[in-house]
Image: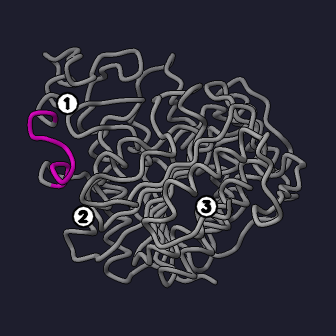
Amino acid sequence: MTGPAVVVYDDRLTQYDFGAAHPLAPVRVELTFRLARAVGVLDLPDLSVVEAPTASDDELALVHTADYIAAVKRAGSASGGPDVRHGLGTPDDPVFAGMHEASAHVVGASLEAARRLWSGDALHAANIAGGLHHAMASAASGFCIYNDPAIAIAWLLAQGARKVAYVDIDAHHGDGVQAAFYDDPRVLTVSLHESPRSLFPGTGESTETGGPGAPGSAVNIPVPPGTDDAGWLRAFHAVVPDVVRAFEPEILVSQHGCDSHAADPLTNLMVSVDGQRNAHLAIHDLAHEVCGGRWLVTGGGGYAIAEVVPRTWTHLLAIVGGQALDPQTPVPSAWREYALEATGRRTPERFTDGHDARYSDWSLGYDPSSWLDRSIAATQQAAFPALGLHPLV
């Protein structure tokens, strides 16, 4: 199932750049678009590419404080510098010239995707340069200056959206989006991530289920370090479809950080591109089942910048465009040569890692000796009742 789709992109989105030594390399976005173009994804009949506007201060203020927006402007100006009180100038979020403008442009891309959905011009809309899910109302965090998915959700609510669900499959907990809506019953935030015991930001336990005014509005699925395709997909399918169906949102917003991959240098999960593709497809199908297909897609983390990110996000863009790529599709040799020249990294020859991405469904049994199964059970027990669901164990 598909419909008209847009990808919001222009080259200025790669100006969100913390410098050559920083792991969030903007070349990963450029490489993705080059690869998507090389295999014909950007030429799909239902997919169009549109430029991104820059978000206004009023739009940023849907989530961020005026004091923080002013601090970002100062820090990135010619006379500016670090402002650690607002998380600016740390190793994770170093100051760079034009930081406010570049960050607001990323937000503008996600807002344009939201506008296209709300107007009915598109059924699916994507900004893979976005997904900066750690930024807080008054502080930068975890490579994120402004929180574009949260701002897009807040904008949709301001237009009259009754309910929005947010699903985050980044290896890191989607803490900033959760914080923005923790006490708002109109938004369900669902995050599948590596355990906070082993990974930044140290939040996202299964017991985090929403504020006093919105019980059940947050669902967290922390999985153990070392979790592979079978375990990651088992956890996803044991929780995500059920809670989204129960919430009955009008629009589904998703964050597709691909740092869950085994090759990622910053995380400890063992997922493949094939497993990630499985999750992309499942989220797409869920949007059609629950939201009439209205689906806003963002990127996120991913630090294997040539080997992994372009392939998994090209899969994602193909799904957004209505024609999923065969995993056996060859990666064009000209693109591989360009990626080697741009990054010094050799890349795989096909869009698959050679995994079949099978998993054991939760309904087939629970193993209490398994850390993964105990985590899934804890999430169901903590989050399901407030949504009218019954844990299976």
Label 3 or label 2, whichever lies nearer to me, is 3
Label 2 or label 1, whichever lies nearer to me, is 2
Relative image position of residue 180 (x, y in whole percent): 28, 49
Q: Which mark is residue 234?
A: none
Write the residue at 67% across / 67% down. Answer: 281
Q: Which residue is mark 1?
A: 72
First along the sequence among labels 2 and 1: 1
Write the residue at 41% across / 75% down. Answer: 249
Q: Is residue 220 above or below residue 39?
A: above
Type of amino acid under label 1:
Val
* In-front residue for pair 309/219: 219
Relative image position of residue 286 (x, y in whole percent): 58, 74
Secondary structure of the residue carrying tag 3 is helix
Write the residue at 72% across / 57% down. Answer: 277
- Decide whether residue 93 is among the magenta residues: no
Type of amino acid under label 2:
Trp
Write the residue at 71% across / 48% down. Answer: 232
Q: Which residue is mark 2?
A: 155
Q: Residues within 10 Å of mark 2 (few under 14, many from 20)?
A: many
Quadrant of res 89: top left
**Horizontal placement of 371 versus 161: left or right?**
right
First along the sequence among labels 3 and 2: 2
Type of amino acid under label 3:
Val
Q: Which residue is mark 3?
A: 239
Secondary structure of the residue carrying tag 2 is helix
Relative image position of residue 348 (x, y in whole percent): 83, 40
**Horizontal placement of 386 versus 351: left or right?**
left
Magenta residues, start to end: 59-68
Relative image position of residue 353 (x, y in whole percent): 85, 46
Q: CA distance from mark 2 to mark 1?
A: 21 Å
